Image (cartoon, coloured by chain):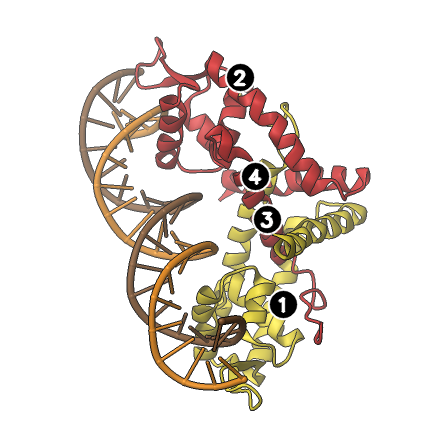
Chain colours: A red, B yellow, C brown, D orange
Amino acid sequence: MEERLTANGLSGLQGYHLRRASKHVQEDLARTLEPFDLRMITFSALSIIAENDGLRQFQLAELLTIERPNLVVIVDELEGNGLIRRDQVKTDRRAYALRITKVGKKRLEDALHAVEAHEKRLFGDLSDEERQALKSALKSIAQNSREEGDHG
Amino acid sequence: MEERLTANGLSGLQGYHLRRASKHVQEDLARTLEPFDLRMITFSALSIIAENDGLRQFQLAELLTIERPNLVVIVDELEGNGLIRRDQVKTDRRAYALRITKVGKKRLEDALHAVEAHEKRLFGDLSDEERQALKSALKSIAQNSREEGDHG
DNA sequence: TATTGTTATACTCTATAACTATA
DNA sequence: TATAGTTATAGAGTATAACAATA
């Protein structure tokens, strides 16, 4: 350790830390979910579908903050693996109601155990206060994007 | 607001929030830096070079958590815009010492003002405690990746 | 033999435009 | 005319393999 290199001194640079942290978490989460045939985005989608039975694809896309076209392959993947169903909506024949299957519930449950371990691994060093602050801070920041979407 | 859709109930799902927050911050930061002909990654690189005069490209790549091949275009871009120099290292003719130029210093200074405003915009809702916790939490999480890199 | 910087390349994630079938 | 889902496509960002020059 001859030289000491830093990336802290300058100013806020939250974006830098956020990018690094997000990257690291995503890589670890990807490894964690691989045995369950899930990716971070399909896992998030499956979780949201489990919470919101019958939601439409455009609603899921909004919650995931991705565009509708990109959601299609995600839903395809989950449906292809038998984890969710696309049910026809009788009142609107354009739309699909997304529902988790029995297999999907089991898969999600199993994956959640692994994800808990992953989170303990990554966030275990943090104090309870830090973890709570992190959680609410991230939600607050992400929430802003919704509001902005409304305005401009 | 007929239905209430959620993505909170299930479990930790920090990855989900982190991904959304990171995405939002990156988008806003990109817009913020555009007038300065900087991207998030070139801005981070420029900041780090300013802090660590003469560092090598592989060291910068490590700090940015990207692979060396991808750094080349970043350094090309900064050099092409006259913001940094690639100085030959006399003791090792393979390597380049990266140094910020006068123009680069000015550009960075100007950009930093805009970035401060950006951070106030995005993190202004947080309490001082939350902001501090967020910062140290993100650093702690990102730091883990370094240690892991050493082990396996 | 290992390392620094580089080139070429491929893969993932995401965004935009335009289509279809319904409403 | 607008909306839900879809297709095709393009652009970032990133990773891997292999090379030249040097250590």
Residue, x 55% and y 56% (percent of image)? B29
The residue labelled by disc 2 is: A106
- Do tags 2 and 1 sit on the same chain? no
Q: Secondary structure at mark 4?
A: helix
The answer to whether residue C18 is above or below residue B25 is above
- Nearer the observer: mark 3 or 1; the answer is 3
Instruction: Check the image and report above or below for B1 versus B68.
Output: above
**Host chain of mark 3:** A
Measured in 3D between alpha carbons, the distance from the residue under mark 3 to the one under mark 1, in whole angstroms, is 25 Å
- Left or right: residue C16 compared with residue A53: left
- In whole angstroms, how far apart are the C-alphas of marks 1 and 4? 33 Å
Q: Position of residue B41 (x, y in %)?
A: 52, 62
Q: Residues within 10 Å of mark 4 (few under 14, many from 20)?
A: many
At label 2, counting other C-alpha atoms closer than 10 Å, the crowd grade (few under 14, some 14-19, many 20 or more) is few
**Can you identify the residue that label 4 sits on?**
A29
Upstream in sequence: badge 2 or badge 3: 3
Q: As displayed, is residue A117 above or below residue B39?
A: above
Corner quadrant of residue B61: bottom right
